Image (cartoon, rainbow, N blue to C red):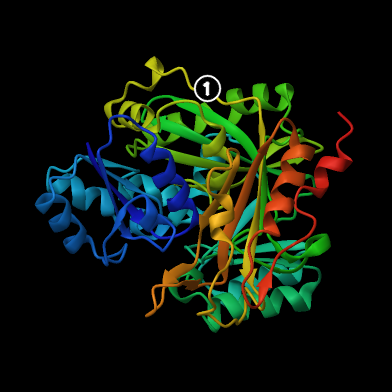
């Protein structure tokens, strides 16, 4: 098979790495890819939103399967564009990717089908949103831009003034463009946040291993929200009881709801959950692999990813015995100092060769490229995902932090406390 992966970050590197293990695959292309992906795939200089160029490339190269890693092209309708050309592609169609593309849609879906989530209201007028906030007596409160905002369009406001400033930032100043045309205001939930990725074939859902993210930029969960500074899998807080509840009231009901709405979902659903005192509730849905969740879940997956993806496309997921290793996995993001606000790029990266021939240690490239001299240099806020397996979470964490020291570049920055929640787990 010839496979095309669309995207160029750490998540796509993990997908390409997993695809490369399939005996069915003879050639991998990645558009646009990065310097790390280039070891495993032929990188093609086509942007993820250039649907015409991507479909033309897939036709020209006789691509057998295209896997879309990123949210923007999915929400924009890349799957529809490929299907219109008779090309085989993995991911939800545009009318199903709205599950991630519109927070108002997903909240309304949950309300209609009694899927547990935070109480909320939606607004298209800044004036109406502020009037609602002025009547609200309960803080903190959460403001969410309706559309895609690189994982950053969520504000937790501790008082009325912060909330008013947030409405201005999202709806008036349009910090995230049209993502702020509609605003969701919801109750602030407290509890442990966990992520569960799943494969969906339009009818049924099969859950992958659980994971837990670290969104804040600095140690101690301080600083600004980011795309994710590290992750671990499995999370001990996702217990058998939690899983039983979610299977019954969240996972399958979501797939059934989308089907009932005439929007059958095929692809990956990422369930962002809050484990509250009242039970698990949905924080958000994503319509693709998480980043960096993919980087800790895929190294633990035993199956050939091509088999699973084809079953999702063909509606035969019930025939797949999805299995994960007992090992734990931890990833630590090496970022550019100053991320997520401003940072310099173009610094040579040293030490990548230290990962060669070391089973259980991986480095997935998030923001890298080749410079004019052919050196691998930094090319983003999140640069690398240093990832390691271990017999349990503590060993995996120790291994990941050991491997962090194998790599160096100017302005290297990372959190020192990824997996700190592991130590709090009482069982």
Residue shown at the point (41%, 77%) measured from the top left: 371
Residue 421 screen position, x and y as percent: 81, 45
Let me know if residue 395 appears in the view. Answer: yes
Residue 89 screen position, x and y as percent: 26, 42
Callout 1 secondary element: loop
Q: Is residue 16 shown above or below 377?
A: above
Residue 4 screen position, x and y as percent: 27, 48
Query: How many residues crowd mark 1 within 10 Å: few (<14), some (14–19), many (20+)?
Result: few
Look at mark 1 in the image and give the residue it sits on: 323
Horizontal relation, residue 403 to residue 347: left or right: right
In which quadrant of the rendered image does the C terminus lie? top right
Residue shown at the point (61%, 57%) measured from the top left: 121
Let me know if residue 118 appears in the view. Answer: no
Residue 239 screen position, x and y as percent: 73, 27
Residue shown at the point (50%, 80%) measured from the top left: 346
Within the image, what quadrant is residue 158 found in? bottom right
Horizontal relation, residue 85 to residue 161: left or right: left
Q: Number of numbered discs present?
A: 1
Horizontal relation, residue 230 to residue 202: left or right: right
In this rendered view, identify the residue nearer to me: 371 or 111.
Answer: 371
In this rendered view, identify the residue nearer to me: 304 or 247.
Answer: 304
In which quadrant of the rendered image does the N terminus lie? top left
Q: Is residue 418 shown above or below 309?
A: below
């Amino acid at each position: 098979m010839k496979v095309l992966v669309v995207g160029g970050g750490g998540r796509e590197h993990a997908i390409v790495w997993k695809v490369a293990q399939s005996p069915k695959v003879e050639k991998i292309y990645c558009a646009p890819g990065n310097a790390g992906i280039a070891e495993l795939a032929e990188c093609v200089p086509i942007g993820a939103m250039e649907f015409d160029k991507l479909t033309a490339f897939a036709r020209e190269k006789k691509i057998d399967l295209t896997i879309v890693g990123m949210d923007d092209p999915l929400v924009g309708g890349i799957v529809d564009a490929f299907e219109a050309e008779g090309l085989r592609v993995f991911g939800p169609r545009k009318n199903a990717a709205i599950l991630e593309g519109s927070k108002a849609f997903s909240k309304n879906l949950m309300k209609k089908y009694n899927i547990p989530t935070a109480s909320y209201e939606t607004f298209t007028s800044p004036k109406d949103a502020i009037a609602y906030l002025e009547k609200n007596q309960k803080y903190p409160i959460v403001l969410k831009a309706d559309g895609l905002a690189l994982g950053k369009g969520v504000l937790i406001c501790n008082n009325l003034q912060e909330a008013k400033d947030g409405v201005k930032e999202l709806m008036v100043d349009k910090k995230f463009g049209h993502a702020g045309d509609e605003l969701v205001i919801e109750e602030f939930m407290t509890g442990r946040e966990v992520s569960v990725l799943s494969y969906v074939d339009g009818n049924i859902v099969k859950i992958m291993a659980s994971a837990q993210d670290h969104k804040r930029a600095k140690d101690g969960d301080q600083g600004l929200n980011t795309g994710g500074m590290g992750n671990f899998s499995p999370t001990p807080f996702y217990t058998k009881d939690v899983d039983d509840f979610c299977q019954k009231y969240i996972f399958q009901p979501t797939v059934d709801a989308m089907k009932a709405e005439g929007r059958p979902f095929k692809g990956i659903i990422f369930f962002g959950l809050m484990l509250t005192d009242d039970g698990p509730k949905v924080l958000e849905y994503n319509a693709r692999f998480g980043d960096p969740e993919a980087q800790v879940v895929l190294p633990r997956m035993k199956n050939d990813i091509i088999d699973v993806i084809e079953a999702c496309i063909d509606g035969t997921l019930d025939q797949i015995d999805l299995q994960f290793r007992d090992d734990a996995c931890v990833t630590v993001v090496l970022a550019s100092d100053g991320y997520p606000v401003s940072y310099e790029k173009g610094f040579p990266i040293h030490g990548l060769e230290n990962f060669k021939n070391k089973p259980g240690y991986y480095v997935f490239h998030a923001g890298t490229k080749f410079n004019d001299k052919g050196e691998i240099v930094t090319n983003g806020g999140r640069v690398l995902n240093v990832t390691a397996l271990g017999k349990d979470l503590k060993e995996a964490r120790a291994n990941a932090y050991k491997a962090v020291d194998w790599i160096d570049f100017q302005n290297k920055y990372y959190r020192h406390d990824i997996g700190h929640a592991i130590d709090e787990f009482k069982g």
